[in-house]
Amino acid sequence: MARIPYPDTRSPDTAMLVERIVAERGKMLNLYSMLLHSPPVCAGWLALLTAIRQQSSLPARIRELVIMRIAIVNGADYEFQQHQPIARSVGINDAEIDALRVPTLTVFGERDQAVLRYCDAMTREVHVADEVFKQVNAHFCEREIVELTATIAAYNLVSRFLEALQVDHD
């Protein structure tokens, strides 16, 4: 149960924002309902996550690998459950999803391993060792590196928000 109540999504003050969320996400998720307590934060959040998920040049498989790994590392079950079907739809199979839960990454190819090491470093230690960065940098152009880094940072934000407020599963 969420730590604070969800606001009324039918409020005239947030009607346009609710319409935008439903248009962009398909429905009003509990995450966005909770964010409606602060319409400016909610609007900014929506813009950032829409840019990351829908306007980035980063391959969808890479994006979903890091989102799933972050959810596991941070114990963010809501995030994991929301993204599991998306991960499958972009070609991540059940064996790979299961492998994200264990320290060994041998089921993944070299590029995916580099990405997951980078994700782990950013999520667990914040600071990324030069060797870890060098490995991931070998596989991506500068734009993709920026988008990968922003994706990892943003989804750490998501998981921390969800878990701190104990947002309920949809």
Image (cartoon, grey):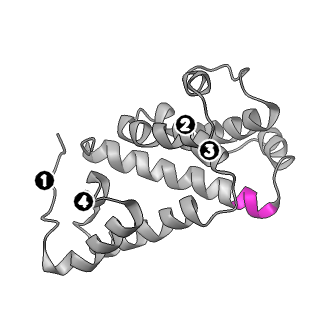
Task: Find numbered disc 1 in the image and state the secondary structure of the residue it sits on.
Answer: loop
Percent from the top left, x then y, of residue 144? 74, 58
**Residue at mark 2 to residue at mark 4: CA–CA distance:** 26 Å
Estimate how packed mark 3 is, as few (under 14), some (14 to 19) or many (20 or more) residues with alpha carbons within 10 Å.
some
Residue 5, which numbered label?
1
Q: Which residue is mark 4?
A: 33
**Residue at mark 1 to residue at mark 2: CA–CA distance:** 32 Å
Select label 1 or label 2 by which is in front.
2
Q: Are marks 4 and 3 in contact (CB under 8 Å)?
A: no
Q: Are marks 1 and 2 in contact (CB under 8 Å)?
A: no
Left-right relation of 167 to 136: left
Question: Which residues fall within the magenta stretch?
Answer: 142-146
Give the main secondary structure of the magenta stretch: helix
Residue 122, which numbered label?
3
**Residue at mark 4 to residue at mark 3: CA–CA distance:** 28 Å
Residue 88, which numbered label?
2
Task: Find numbered disc 3 in the image and state the secondary structure of the residue it sits on.
Answer: helix
**Residue at mark 1 to residue at mark 3: CA–CA distance:** 32 Å
Instruction: Say if 141 sits above or below 41 in the image.
Output: above
Task: Looking at the picture, tell me which residue is in the foreground, 129 or 104.
Answer: 104
Instruction: Say if 101 sits above or below 47 in the image.
Output: above
Asked which quadrant contains residue 123, the reply is top right
User: Which residue is rendered at x = 73% and y = 27% of the image?
Assistant: 108
Estimate how packed mark 4 is, as few (under 14), some (14 to 19) or many (20 or more) residues with alpha carbons within 10 Å.
some
| Residue 119 shown in magenta | no
Chain-order first, disc 2 or disc 4 = 4
Chain-order first, disc 2 or disc 3 = 2
Q: Amino acid at mark 2?
A: Arg
Estimate how packed mark 2 is, as few (under 14), some (14 to 19) or many (20 or more) residues with alpha carbons within 10 Å.
some
**Residue at mark 4 to residue at mark 1: CA–CA distance:** 10 Å
Percent from the top left, x then y, of residue 102? 58, 19
